[in-house]
Image (cartoon, rainbow, N blue to C red):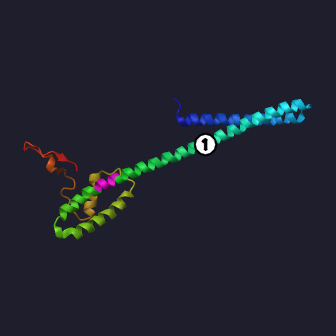
Amino acid sequence: MLSVSDIAAEMDEGLGALFRDGLELAARVKADAMEAETAGERARLALSFHRIARSVRQTAALRLKIAAEAARSGREAAAEGVERQAARVAGRKAQVRAQVQRLIWREHEAPDDETLREETTEDLDALLEIEVQDEAFLDTAPEALVARLAEQLGLAEEGADAPQADDAAASPEGGEPRWSSA
C-alpha cells in the first residue's frame, strides 16, 4: 500500500511531466501557427495554442497549490507536535511540583514557617524551570525527579518515594488502607 507521501510524489511527478509536455506542445503549435500559410489555419492553430497554454497554466497553478498545502500541513503537524510536547512537560511539571509541595508543607507545617515555605516554593519553581530544560525530563520517573528536587531543597527524603495513605481511602472494615500515588 502506498503512503500519502508516495502518492503525493507520484502525483507531482505526473503533473511535472504534464507541464513539460504541454509547454513543449504549445511551443510546437506556436511555431506551426507562425508558419501557417492561410489565415484560417493560423486561427485554428492559435485556438489550439490558447487551449494548450491555458492547460499548462492550470497545471502549474495546481502544482504550486499542492506544494503550498503540503508545506502548510507540515508546519501544522510540527506545531501540533510542539504543543503536545509542551502540554506533556507542563503536566509532568505540575505533577512533580505538587508532590514536592506536599513535602515542603510536611517539613514546614508550623504557622510561623510560612516565609520559609514561600521561599522554598520559590526555590522549587526555579529548580523546576531548570529541570524542564533537560531533554530527559519526560523520560525521568516522577519519583526520581521528586527525590532529586527534595534533596536539592534540603527536604527530608522520608515519604518522598513512599506512597501516601489517603484518609478518605482507608478501608471501612478497619483493615489495610488503600494507597494512593498522590
Residue 126: image x %, image y %?
34, 64
Residue receiving disc 1: 67
Question: Which residue occupies 18% across, 58% down?
Answer: 158
Query: Residue 51 lies in what quarter of the image?
Result: top right
Please state the extent of the stretch shown in magenta in the rendering. Answer: 91-96
The vertical placement of 159 against 55, above or below, is below
The vertical placement of 42 against 111, above or below, is above
Residue 171: image x %, image y %?
11, 44
Mark 1: give few (<14), some (14-19) or many (20+) Cα within 10 Å.
some
Q: Is residue 35 magenta?
A: no
The vertical placement of 151 against 8, above or below, is below
Q: Is the stretch drawn in magenta largely helix, strand or loop?
A: helix
Q: Which residue, as the protein is rendered here, is positioned at the far right?
A: 37
The secondary element bearing badge 1 is classed as helix
Q: Is residue 94 magenta?
A: yes
Question: Which residue occupies 25% across, 56% down?
Answer: 99
Residue 68: image x %, image y %?
60, 44
Compare residues 105 and 41 and report the one nearer the observer: 41
Compare residues 156 and 31 and report the one nearer the observer: 31
Residue 71: image x %, image y %?
56, 45
> Left of 98 or right of it: where is 68?
right
> Left of 65 or right of it: where is 34?
right
> Left of 53 or right of it: where is 117?
left
The amino acid marked with disc number 1 is Ala
Question: Which residue occupies 30% across, 66% down?
Answer: 122
Report the label total: 1
